[in-house]
Image (cartoon, coloured by chain):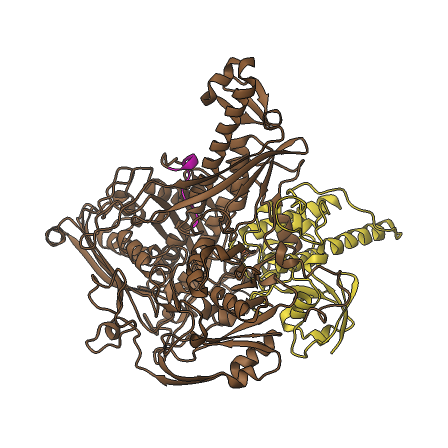
Chain colours: A yellow, B brown
Amino acid sequence: MRVNMTVNGRPYEADDVWEGESLLYVLRERLGLPGSKNACEQGECGSCTVRLDGVPVCACLVAAGQAEGREVVTVEGLADHARQRSVTRAAEAAGAVRPAEPEADQPGEPEADPSTGPGPSRPGQVVGAPLAPVQQAFIDAGAVQCGFCTPGLLVAADELLERNPEPSDADIREALSGNLCRCTGYEKILDAVRLAAARTGEGA
Amino acid sequence: MAADRTLNAPTGVAADRTASAPTSLTQATGAPRGTVGESAPRPDGTLKVTGEFAYSSDLWHEDMLWGFTLRSPHAHAAIRSIDTAAALALPGVYAVMTHDDLPAGTHYGLEIRDQPVLAKDRVRYHGEPVAIVAADHPETARRAAARIAVEYEELPLVVGEATATAPDAPLLHPGRRDHHASHVPHPNIVHRQPIRRGDVPAARARADVVVRRDYEVGMQDQAFLGPESGLAVPAEDGGVDLYIATQWLHVDRDQLAPVLGLPADKVRLTLSGVGGAFGAREDLSMQAHACLLALRTGRPVKIVYNRYESFFGHVHRHPAKLTYEHGAARDGTLLYVQCRIVLDGGAYASSSPAVVGNAASLSIGPYVVENVDVEAVALYSNNPPCGAMRGFGAVQACFAYEAQMDAVAAELGLDPVEFRQRNAMSQGATMPTGQVVDSPAPVAELLRRVKALPMPPERAWETAGGPVDVRALPGGLSNTTHGEAVVRGVGYAVGIKNVGFSEGFDDYSTARIRLEVIGGEPVALVHTAMAEVGQGGVTVHTQIARTELGVDRVTLHPADTRVGSAGSTSASRQTYMTGGAVKHACEAVRAEVLRRGRERFGASHPGWAEPERLRLADGKVVTDGGEVIGDLAGILGDGAIDLEREFRHRPTEPFDLRTGQGFGHVQYSFCAHRAVVEVDTELGLVKVVELAAAQDVGKAINPLSVVGQIHGGSTQGLGLAVMEEIVVSADGARVRNPSFTDYLIPTILDTPAMPVEVLELADDHAPYGLRGVGEAPTLSSTPAVVAAIRAATGFPLRRVPVRPEHLTQLTHLTHPAGG
Ligand code: FES
Ligand code: FES
């Protein structure tokens, strides 16, 4: 079958999709978007978390056909999504709609430069592109070790902060309880979400 | 497949993913710097938060096929026949291979090559690989595998010590000729290590208090999140390139080459993104299968396990049965320890011999005991193969000896922390192996520190005047209690772990450093084969290069087999060993910089004559008086310095096979925990409220990463204490819970606040004085949590994981397998 959907604001079309394929499989294997992860493929780990029409879902539990005509946001589109949101909110606050403007570079971690070193470069890497606050906070707080849980956690944490900009620790734990991490013991993940909330609060 | 892949995605995105898997990482100018001792950010951090970091399961190649493994449904059976015709007939299937199709070597293994690449005429555990398939869609490969007809005849099972060593026991590996075969008491025992010191019978006669108890540790899974996966690409020279998530590229290669019938230089491995390891990637999983299918079909082959298969795809932590007897004098002095540790190694040896050595040599914990009688063995059985997991033999022992320490203290009427401190080892102490501990061993101090931390507030679920916050209670949002019958308990534990490979192993690591001027600025390239599995070794390498070479920009070359071995990312060894190799190679590069500088500019300043008083900083050559006498860019000009160096830790010795005596370990690492739990005593539900740790790390090369390791290790220990166990059916030795639905690991709701105290007492034998960090916190966390539950409930709790049914009045020590 053919499946059409909008992913990170761009239209995508996938052909010859077998009915049993999950949204996760189509994103990863057919659309070239492997950022969403596949740690369990049975709805237990949250590593595949994406937004489907705004709602966080486990992409491994969504049949590809169910995404037909819908909007998907993955970790690859999270920075854009957060930028759009802050622009929209600023515009709402100002009572007018203005076009998006690029934000100043965030402080933080050095970028990988695909142009140096042996081996072919990675495509799609935008050096110096600003990250979503929650992405930057994960780096700064040490919330990333192997990073396999990170994409799903970021999508879930960003969604939490979208609806609850000042979450308590108990709120954070509740919102992230569907996302397993085997490396960090979650302490630094809590730190990161607190940090993102604090920074966003300051910036607002 | 490539054609129907996508219409709208930017062209080339997917196709390039393979080659770009080994991402080169450069620290860009203007970014925050990090030298040794600073919390430098991860060089792969941005890629990991944007989803662009390529894990081994993300790889893609033009024309790629998908591999799938058919596994045995039986734990022990003879294979009578295999018919692959129906599988081969399925459209989209390119190859089906069984044992008979193997081109060269048929077995592999880390220490003993006893594991078949594909089962021949016998399967020895549930889930053993029997056949492999390559097809153009993963589902086609799965369906083809289901069409392979295998005729089995079930055989009697070996499932524990009694069945393994019975007179008529079926032998797992009849006719074995490995180097342990001659000294074991039975061919179903992989390895046996006794440790004898002093005079236990005489000490027993003097003891005022004797405590003898049995303990049991369930089978824990590493449960890394990134599944076993990789991509094998056949090369034009007849060789193969494998992009893989592993812990040790070179030992993978050394096991693969004989199986593929290729010289080692035609089996080229490159590290792909690794989603955690914890020991589970020490053994081969899909590596040989993917390479075999790629060479057979002439097409790239990708294999990705799903979570179900992952539970069968790697070894687990050895389940253990332990018997301990401690004797003490009335004044609180430990007089002797006698213990026996039986580890179930499952069907194949994996790293069981080394796990036995660790369990035996670390069996009495970080205490001074003059009279010791220890025996540790690992069995061959039809249970799932067990091998490396974080803590490696020391975890099982720590659960038992720390429970004993509490029990002896109770018998003596002493405070459990004080009793531990009275017997704690310190620098200069002698291990039961006769080895003198020749670097700091601040065991009593670590206990003092965790004990001195403030206690978490009581009854945190009570809100000022408001309703009860059930999220702070055992059972959480299940709303099972509002505080009734909830009892708090506090427990302590401390452990000892070795760092680095032991028992005379030639443990070394290699690093290549290239220093050159790029764009007017000196840049260091660090090339090692170290497996970055999440631990942050890549960050450490940039910090060391910056510190030693005084440069700002550091590039990390992808880890591959084109440089010498880095050894394994295990045994808490990589910062010590590959960090040490990077330091060592940087020192050689620095010496060459100074030699070239002296050659060209020696006449201009007398400082050049004394290179030992010069250092490199901020791209300059600086005297110990702080005077700048040259700059790197000027000295290097167009010439690069490119040097590869090996680093070894001081040699160790094997343990004597009868007495266990020997200088077996290179370094020891210590961590102490205090656990605070609240237990709903009616339902047996446990909430760990706080898990505090204190650890000596020698030198925190990256403090943020150090604390992250302690948090992660503590949490895995918590998992073993209260939830994690692979349940193997007693009747069929079949794995009953191979999923994250049934095998539970701690979520963010199960994991408490974890205050950490870090001590830095330098070990003068180690680079920068550092001490391996990763494993020690996994040891003491389990017994601390269980001690706290004992304190809350009064139940003896001799088995982990502790389950609700162990905490109600109904049952003690029930076996969850229900067998
Ligand atoms: S991969 Fe979807 S929940 Fe685990
Ligand atoms: S699973 Fe490795 S960082 Fe979370």
Which residue does the image show at 45% across and 75% down from the upper left?
B101
In the rendered view, tell whether residue B33 sits above or below residue B61. Answer: above
Horizontal side of A165 relative to A142 (left or right) equals right
Which residue does the image show at 31% across and 46% down from the upper left?
B665
In which quarter of the view is residue B425 placed?
Answer: top left
- In percent of width and height, residue B17 lies at 65, 58
The span shown in magenta is B766-774
Find ligand 2 in the image and state its quadrant: bottom right
Residue B236 on the magenta segment: no
- Magenta-drawn stretch, dominant element (helix, strand or loop): loop
In the rendered view, tell whether residue B106 sits above or below residue A113. Answer: below
The answer to whether any part of residue B766 appears in the image is yes
Which residue does the image show at 31% across and 71% down from the upper left?
B381
Front residue of B149 and B220: B149
The quarter of the image holding the N terminus of chain B is bottom right
- In percent of width and height, residue A164 lies at 69, 56
Front residue of A170 and A81: A81
**What is the number of callouts on the image?**
0
The answer to whether any part of residue B702 appears in the image is no
The quarter of the image holding the C terminus of chain B is bottom left
